[in-house]
Image (tube, helix red, strand yellow):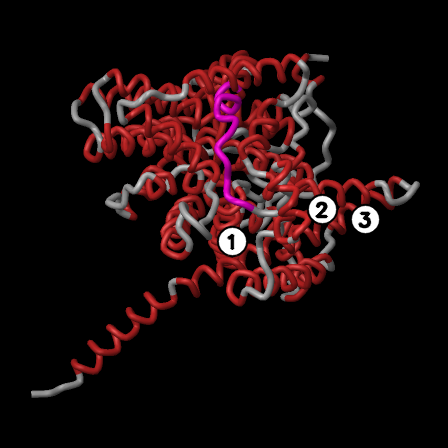
Amino acid sequence: MSDENKTRRPYAPRMSPHQTYEEINSYVVFWGLFFSVLFALAVGYLCLKIGQTVDAFAPVSVLAMGMAVLFHRRNAFPETVHIQAIASAGTNIIGGAMFILPALYILNIEDVSFLEMAIPIVLGGVLGVFLATVFRRYFCEEMDGVYPFPSGSAAAEVLESDEGSKAHIMLVSGAVALVYDFVLNSIGWWQELLTTTTFHWGQVLADKYKLVFSLDNDAALLGIGMLAMSGIIGLLSMSGVVVRVVKRAVADLFSKGASSSGMLLRTQQDLPMTQIVFVSLLMTILFAVFFHVMCAESLTQTVIAFVLVMLFALMLSVVGISSIAFTGNEPVSGMTIFMIIVSAVVMGGAGMAGKTGIIAILMMAAFLCATLAVSSNFMSELKVAYITGATPKKMQQWQLVSIVLAGVVSVGVVFLMHHAYGFTGEGALAAPQANAMAAIVKPMMDGGDAPWPLYMAGAFFAVLLWMMKIPPLAFALGSYLPMGINTPVLVGGLISYFVSHSSDDAKVNAKRLSEGNTVASGFVAGGAIGSLISAVLHIAGIVAYFVLCIFLYAMAKRAVK
């Protein structure tokens, strides 16, 4: 038996590779794009609030299955698979916008337009889809037995379980969370910040012993050096994968075998490799042109930026894909921070500085972050296609459409949240990753001294954690998110643990945990949407003013000669 066959697991996909199915139709496209926009709005707010993104596959899968029952869809399974795949773009691209763009406002840079923010996000997202396509065969098929893909496998399990009844549970829990967050943010019947200093005994502890416990707070900037070193460790550990995947892509590009003669099974078909290479280069070139017009002071700076983003996109995308293939999570922020530090040093050496330099580095970071977030998360969707028997090529085509739409929407969320809450000061959204990016890039571009001793100390600590078999990325994330944000995550983890150990029967525990995950997904979606509605109400005055202007204009036009 060949080494390649040893890495494959036996599958009997629900959709046979030897049959054709109606996977894409107007019903699929409409609901897929609808949920893509909806979750880009909801999860975008959540990301700015606590620094974490949430996959859309669970709630969308359950809702799509419920709709299939409600609308009596005869082609339910293929449609549901592709609805959740298209919808996933709404959360796949979130990181590029939410982790980077608020840093502009944090640094009081207000003159970057909506279009200028959207261009690197969309271009990077499209590149991410193509990079995932390049690596699909290696990660999803050839190394199937090596990479478990927790998120993709879970999504496939939900889809194949055909549990449309879960939609009711999710809708109820979502409605509860929507009302809770709406009341919290708009009416204010109770405080969002639950802290021991509210009580007399808590204030005494704080004054005397400096002990404070809270359930929400502003983000603290800690662990930056650990995050950067986490990206380096991941890159070094996966360097062999980078070489193997690049060799495979080059071989496919010049191959005259099955892939070019149309002999592949439906479930093995990808976008043409020539198209992938051409568009991938085009996206990077278009970004370079954008960079030259907006930021660069010389052609040399543009060429350096082009080389940096191309190399980082290729190498770090493999790190992110490998991470999500093993753990279900990808270190996008850590890898982007690593890129920012390196790029700031290199571009600073090329003469960039000040406000222009800050904008240049952040635009490069936005492009790369969108690429990494999309490539790794979309790979999970391609794993779903492999397990369920969907056609990868169709999934790739419509992911491109959804990525463009979701990319524009995600930038709109940043604009909305900036005007509704802001990212600095009292009551502002924490935007922890963006604050970290701003804290790193400003001193490096303003001619000040970057806190290199702190970065090196964090990097050294990350190496120690890695040697102790402790994931440095997870530790670093926990170190710069404040107690008020970490505590709810801990509480949720404890509830999950107790539920998963509430019975002596493993099957019962698994079923209860699945039920809890459904309720939690509903809480996430409903709570984020409720908070988003509150954000809209915060700027309702602007909308009302705009409506009055239209009314005035329309009434004035009624006058006749």
Q: Is residue 171 above or below residue 282?
A: below
Secondary structure of residue under mark 3 = helix
Q: For mark 2, what is the residue?
A: 160
The Cα–Cα distance between marks 1 and 2, rounded to whole angstroms, is: 26 Å
Q: Earlier in the sequence, mark 1 or mark 3?
A: 1
Compare residues 237 and 437 and report the one nearer the observer. 437
Which of discs 2 and 3 lies nearer the camera? The answer is 3
**Residue 226, magenta (yes or no):** yes
Q: Position of residue 543 (x, y in %)?
A: 34, 67
Q: Which residues are magenta?
A: 217-229
Residue 22 % position (x, y) = 57, 51
Measuring from the top left, give residue 407's x and y in whole percent: 40, 45
Image-quadrant location for residue 463: top right
- The residue singled out by tag 1 in the image is 42
Q: Inspect the magenta stretch and tell me whether residue 65 lies in it.
A: no
The structure residue drawn at horizontal position 11% and vertical position 87%, both measured from the top left corner, is 560
Seen from this angle, which residue lies furthest right?
504
Which amino acid does the dot numbered 3 rest on? Arg
Whether residue 264 is visible? no
- Secondary structure beneath disc 2? helix
Label 1 to label 3: alpha-carbon separation: 26 Å
- Disc 2 residue type? Glu
Q: In the rendering, which numbered label is found on residue 512?
A: 3
Mark 2 and mark 3 lie on one chain; the one further toward the N terminus is 2
Instruction: Residue at 76% x, 47% y: name it.
Output: 514
Q: Nearer the viewer, residue 126 or 369?
A: 369
Quick check: marks 2 and 3 in contact, CB under 8 Å?
no
Whichever of labels 1 and 2 marks the residue nearer the N terminus, that label is: 1
Q: Quadrant of the N terminus?
A: top right
Q: Callout 1: few (<14), some (14-19), or many (20+) C-alpha neighbours within 10 Å?
A: many
